Amino acid sequence: MDALQSQAMSKAEAALRARRRRAIHAALARMDEGEYGYCCDCGEEIAPRRLEIDPAAATCVSCASAR
């Protein structure tokens, strides 16, 4: 049972790393396009504090809460 649990945890960690990697690449692409710091849903500016906490944030707090 421990081996199965360990394998499941490893898969979950790998999936989390892959999602984070995609989010970072998307943020870098938004920087290249001049769109970094603006919400991908509503177009409003993302609060600087939110970007300090998560530089890869793609949405403002309002849009993130609506999801």
Image (cartoon, rainbow, N blue to C red):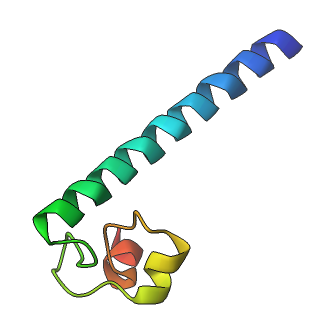
43 with respect to 9 (left or right): left
Observer able to see residue 1? no
Horizontal and vertical percent position of residue 28: 28, 56
Residue found farthest to the left: 33
Q: Is residue 50 shown above or below 12?
A: below
On-image quarter of the C terminus? bottom left
Residue 7 image offset from top left, x and y in percent: 71, 16
Give the x, y percent position of residue 38: 23, 78
Residue lying at 71% horizontally and 28% vertically, measured from the top left? 9
Q: Residue at x 24, y 76 (%)?
A: 39
- Residue at image coords 38%, 73%: 64
- Front-lying residue, 63 or 35: 35
Give the image quarter of residue 5: top right
Residue 25 visible in the displayed image = yes
Image spot of residue 32 (x, y percent)? 17, 61
Depth check: 33 or 56 in front?
33
